[in-house]
Every structure is written in C-alpha cells, then in structure tokens.
C-alpha cells in the first residue's frame, strides 16, 4: 500500500507559511515597549503614560489630570514622575538644568523651595535578568560636595603631621598660590538619576499604577522606585496578532479544507483506485448535494417565471389558435395510428 501524501502536503504548507513570516523584515519597536527574549511576552507601558489634556485624542473621566506621585517618607520630600514622557506639570527654575531641558524632565522633587530633577525623559526599557527596569539620567547635579569635603578632612586628620614640619597641612601646599583644593575636584559633576523597577499587578481593583519610593544612594545621586501595574504583566503584541480572531479561524479552516481535499484525493486514487471526479472525497455526498441544489434552482426559476406578467396583444391570438390546432391534429393522428396498429394485431 502506498503511503498517503497528506502529511507531506501539510508539512509543505507549514514550511511555506513559516518562510513567508520570516521573510518580513521586523519593524522597529514602538517607544516604551519591549519584548522579553526569555518568555516572548510583550510589554507596553504607554497605558500608564500620563498625556497632557491638549494632546489627548479622547478624554475620559478616569484620565489623570496630573503626573504620578510617590511619598518620600523619611527623605523629606515627595516625588513626581511620569513614564516614557515628561511630567505634565509646568516646571520652572530647575536646579542647574538648562532651561531648554525643563520640558523634558520625567522625574523631580521639591525640597527647600527648590526643584531638583532626577532624570530626563527616556522611553527605553531594559531587562535585568527577569526584572523589567526603566532608567532616567541627566538630572540635577548631585549635592555631594559637602560630603566629599568631610571625607577629605577626616583623611587629613589621620595623617597627623607626617611630614614633621610642626603643622597638619600635609605637604605645606595650603595657602600657596596656584594650589587647587582637593574638595573641588577636577572631573565633570555627577548628575542625579532614577531607577524604576516594574512589577506585575493583576488586581482589578487597584489603580493603573502604584508607585513606592524605595530609597536613595548615600550621595543622593540615584533614586530607586518600585512600580506595580497590570501594564508590567506582559501579553501579546497587537502587530503580532494583526490577523485577528476571525482571520485565525479562517486560516485554520483553510488548512483543514486543504488537508481534507488533498488527503482524500490521495486516498481515493491510491487505495480505492478511483479516477476522474470520483477521486474527490465523499463524491456521492457532494454529487447529491449538487443535484439537490440544481433542482432547487430549477424550481425557483420556474416559480419566478409564472409570477411574471404575461404579454397580451392581438398578434398572439393566431399563435394560440395555431398551437391548439396543431396539438389537436397531432392527437388525432396518434389515435388513428393506434387504431390501425390494433386492427393489424387483431387480424394476425
């Protein structure tokens, strides 16, 4: 017995579909989105991005009128931030940040009447292991000059006049012209940054995002936040699922119909040794359905023809009379022929 070619045809169809999908060049990801290389889940944080009222296409009562807030607790200041976009508040006099960049601040806090930026706008998401992280950089300069100066003084006190000149200035360079104080430093100033860890929260009663301030580095240069939101749970990209449920169902039906057709033809031809139209699977059923549809069509057309109005005119009268006369004449001839045939049989 020959092997059925249905699995081979199925494999060919699958291969062609895979090659067509791989031939498409991947599009660059949208801002504030990322796909996990480990699980393949798609993450989109645009759902928790606060957009200014004038830039919104549709307004809703549940839309936020201000950026997200987080309590600083023992830090002494509260924080305001946005995701993948600048805060919608109008900021002025941001400490040691160029005025042109005030509109790009994505996180800040107010302390002592001064506004400090802790990061500029960024729409890049990264994975650190299995943790989804967002990072803001280029904020206000770090306020660590006092702490550096204290550390240097403590180190100098430990030296205790190691040079033996009777003072504790170390190398006798203090007060000399051209000496640079070590507390000022010669490198570029460090700037504040923000690290946001995003966690999944599927609670339907919770808000879109819950932000908690975790802490800050000792030099107040890096601030850590934890965000819980349903947007950080991951899902399927809309571009990947661009066909839609109806399209997916249609593709499944087409594949099933192709397997049924080609597999049935292979079976009827190789096993049942059928030829012509009888190679089709379940030929008798399909032929009966076609005959039934043909009869229904004939009945429907004849019924519609009877409903059409008949043409009445003087020129049709002779035609009806001729047809009736010819019909009567043919019937008489048939009767005579039948009588003659019966007479001949009776004579025989």
Image (tube, grey):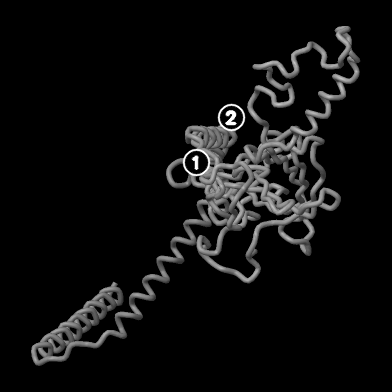
Cα distance in 3D space between marks 2 and 1 = 15 Å
Element under disc 1: loop
Of the pair 17 and 22, the residue shown nearer to us: 22
Q: Is residue 238 visible?
A: yes
Element under disc 2: loop
Earlier sequence position, callout 2 versus callout 1:
2
Q: Is residue 122 visible?
A: no
Q: Callout 2: 10 Å neighbours few (<14), some, many (20+)?
A: few
Q: Quadrant of residue 120?
A: top right
Above or below, 162 relative to 223: above
Residue at the image point whose x is 56% and y is 68% from the top: 59
Side of 202 relative to 319 (left or right): right
Q: Tell me the quarter of the image containing the N terminus.
A: top right
Return the residue at label 1.
274
Residue 254, horizontal then vertical, whole percent? 52, 48
Above or below, 174 relative to 53: above
Side of 290 relative to 31 (left or right): left
Residue 272, horizontal then vertical, whole percent? 55, 40
Return the residue at label 2.
2
Above or below, 347 relative to 26: below
Q: Which mark is residue 318?
A: none
Side of 334 relative to 169 (left or right): left
Q: Tell me the quarter of the image containing the C terminus.
A: bottom left
Of the pair 136 and 116, the residue shown nearer to us: 116
Q: Callout 1: 10 Å neighbours few (<14), some, many (20+)?
A: some
Of the pair 298 and 72, the residue shown nearer to us: 72
């Amino acid at each position: 017995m020959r092997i059925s070619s249905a699995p081979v045809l199925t494999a060919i169809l699958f291969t062609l579909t895979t090659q067509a999908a791989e031939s498409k060049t991947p599009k660059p990801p949208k801002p504030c989105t990322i796909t996990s290389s480990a699980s393949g889940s798609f993450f989109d944080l645009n759902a928790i991005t606060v957009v200014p009222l004038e830039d919104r296409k549709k307004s809703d009562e549940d839309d936020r009128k201000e950026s997200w807030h987080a309590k600083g607790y023992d830090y002494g200041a509260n924080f305001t931030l946005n995701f993948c976009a600048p805060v919608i508040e109008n900021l002025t006099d941001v400490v040691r940040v160029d005025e042109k960049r005030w509109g790009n601040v994505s996180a800040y806090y107010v302390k002592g009447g001064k506004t400090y930026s802790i990061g500029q706008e960024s729409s890049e998401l990264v994975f650190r292991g299995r943790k989804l992280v967002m990072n803001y950089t280029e904020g206000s300069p770090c306020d660590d000059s006092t702490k550096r100066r204290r550390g240097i003084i403590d180190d100098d006190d430990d030296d205790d006049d190691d040079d033996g000149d009777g003072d504790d200035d170390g190398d006798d360079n203090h007060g000399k012209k051209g000496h640079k104080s070590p507390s000022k430093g010669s490198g570029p100033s460090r700037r504040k940054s923000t690290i946001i860890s995003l966690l999944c929260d599927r609670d339907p009663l919770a808000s879109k995002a819950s932000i908690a301030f975790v802490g800050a580095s000792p030099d107040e240069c890096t601030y850590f936040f934890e965000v819980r939101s349903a947007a950080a749970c991951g899902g399927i990209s809309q571009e990947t699922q661009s066909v839609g449920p109806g399209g997916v169902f249609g593709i499944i039906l087409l594949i099933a119909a192709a397997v049924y057709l080609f597999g049935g033809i292979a079976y009827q031809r190789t096993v049942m040794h059928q030829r012509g139209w009888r190679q089709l699977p379940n030929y008798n059923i399909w032929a009966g359905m076609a005959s039934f549809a043909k009869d229904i069509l004939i009945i429907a057309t004849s019924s519609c023809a009877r409903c059409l109005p008949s043409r009445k005119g003087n020129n049709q009268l002779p035609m009806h009379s001729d047809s009736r006369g010819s019909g009567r004449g043919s019937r008489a001839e048939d009767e005579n022929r039948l009588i003659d045939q019966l007479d001949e049989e009776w004579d025989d």
